[in-house]
Amino acid sequence: MIRLFFFLTFTLTSWTFSLGVSEKNDNFAAQMIRITGKTGQTLLTVAMGVCVFLFWYVGYPQALSYHEQYQLFLWTGDYFVERAAVPGGLADWMGEFVVQFYYVEWLGALLLALVFMAVQQVTRSMVVPVLLLWLMGDPNVLLSYAVALILAVGAARLNRSEGVRGALGNVLMVPLVYWATGPLAWVYVASPIPFQREGATNGRARCWVLPLYLMVLQLAAYQWLLPQWPLEMVLLPELFYRIPLQCPVLMWVIPLVAVGSSWITRIPLFTNYKAAFRTVQCAMVIILVWLGVTRGYDREMYELIWQDYQVRNERWDAIVERAKEYQVKTAFSSVCVNLALAEKRQLADRMFDFYQSGEDALLMPRIRDLTSMLPTMEAFWRLGMVNSAQRYAFDTQESILNGRKSGRCTKRIAECMLVNGHRQTAQKQLDLLKKTVFYRQWAEQPTADAAVKARRYRQDFLFSYPEMDKMLGMLFMDNQDNKMALDYFMGQLLLKGDVQGFAQYLPMVQQHGGYQRMPLGYQDVVLCIQRQGNVPDSPYAAYVKRMSAGRRNNGQ
């Protein structure tokens, strides 16, 4: 609600001032705008930037962390050449350059606000940045899309040449804009020429020659330079979406609105009815802000991203306190909450006070996507199951569908190798991290985590996921100071419904758990065993009943 308040307040204020610019309106706002001139418009842009900064920094810092962890920007010439070697690559490189600073939340939010301000300035429209805000609710939209839009519209506004000179200039500009912005070069060729003189012929020629010219360039690039790309990626802005061959509708709409905004001001009807047009724009902005914030940012998805963000930053209290009020009923969320409880040594007491998804609530099986395995990777790492943590980190990185590396996963892979004593193998990962801004300091003086090294298995072996309880038990037996492994072992038995195994190993908890009394959660389980589940208000009895009903519904 705070984020929505900031945006609604700004849009209402900015368009109230804009409505006062009409010559037929002599109210105080109009007079102030006339006095301040460009300064007033600049202040409105700055106000929008402040709102955008607060939106991301206060409301969605987890989104910044999400984007930063799925790329590894390298400060090398080879990295620049690799990115800039394809159409749209320059915008992609510039977008990644900005995203690397998301590592510092306030700095990332500030840079993102500057990007939105640039979009508003070049398009001279409030509708475009609001639509962009809506679009970026999809976490797979890359910032390079906004950068490409700025470059394409900016190039169109800078192109003031006409006649033969203008035609020759476009022969050079269209390929350059296409190589810099990719398919968003269509914004350049479709935009009107600023300050075009009355009667000039260049504008009419531009209407059909430049689009044809750009289409030929795209097909030529597809035929001779990008044969490995599907045709859709050459023609459409799918380069700026993390999932190949998918493209949200808004990625088509925003360029159309940007071009339409530049054309509509040249219509005589607009000049005669400025106030009416601005009233419509004001209503559109308010409606789009509401739709973008309420529908563009899925609550459950961003709650899961928030939990992983807190796990990454080891904010265990925040996870537990939030789960008391709201918890998404997925295995991903259960893993995050249980890890937070284990780090606070409260898993045995409070595990079933929160939603448990089933046997995968402590450690999820491998799922080949770029998000699901991250909390389990962190749990493996803290338990001391180093090889499993490394495997999950590697699989996550390889599941990034646009082929990028992950700074977070690369660092974890290096840490796992160092703990296992494979310094030479880790050197490849360390060399990459040394070429970054925020991972360089650690990579120059890497150390193997002594606590994790002490907890790990004494020997290597293979295991399957259904044997996870046995693996946790063996992990504890290898190092009986690993209390987290003991808590996870007992918790896994309870999630499986193995009450006999739980009762068998309960004396081990009393001997090695370090508890002065039996944990409240275990007391509840013992009571359920004694009364055969007939315990009103028992968290564990409720869990067993829910899982039993689920098995019956599934015919198991």
Image (cartoon, rainbow, N blue to C red):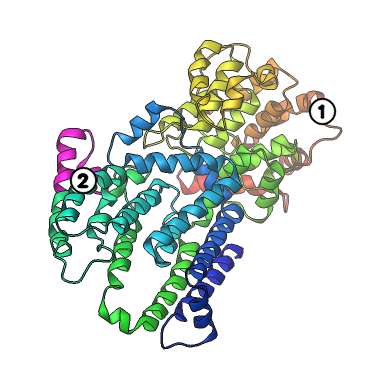
Magenta-colored stretch includes residue 501: no
Query: On residue 245, which mark appears?
Result: none
Q: Position of residue 184 (x, y in %)?
A: 29, 51
In this view of the protein, which residue sits in the foreground, 307 or 83? 83
Number of dots carrying numbers: 2
SS for dot 2: helix
- The residue furthest right is 516
Magenta-colored stretch includes residue 231: yes
Residue appearing at x 31%, y 66% in the figure: 262
Residue at the spot of label 2 = 172
Residue appearing at x 56%, y 47% in the figure: 62
Q: Relative to 129, does residue 312 appear above or below in the rendering? A: above
Q: Residues within 10 Å of mark 1 (few under 14, many from 20)?
A: few
Q: Position of residue 510 (x, y in %)?
A: 81, 27
Numbered range of the magenta stretch: 215-236
Q: Position of residue 28 (x, y in %)?
A: 54, 84
Magenta part, dominant SS: helix
Residues at discs 1 and 2 in contact (Cβ within 8 Å): no
- Residue 37 placement, left or right of 527: left
Which amino acid type corresponds to the residue marked 1 in the rendered image? Gly
- Residue 230 placement, left or right of 309: left
Which amino acid type corresponds to the residue marked 2 in the rendered image? Leu
Q: In the rendered image, which quarter is residue 54 located in?
A: bottom right
Which tag is nearer the camera, tag 1 or tag 2?
A: 2
Residue at the spot of label 1 = 514
SS for dot 1: loop
Distance CA(mark 1)–CA(mark 2): 74 Å
In this view of the protein, which residue sits in the foreground, 204 or 182? 204
- Residue 238 placement, left or right of 43: left
Q: In the rendered image, which quarter is residue 207 located in?
A: bottom left
In this view of the protein, which residue sits in the foreground, 228 or 111? 111
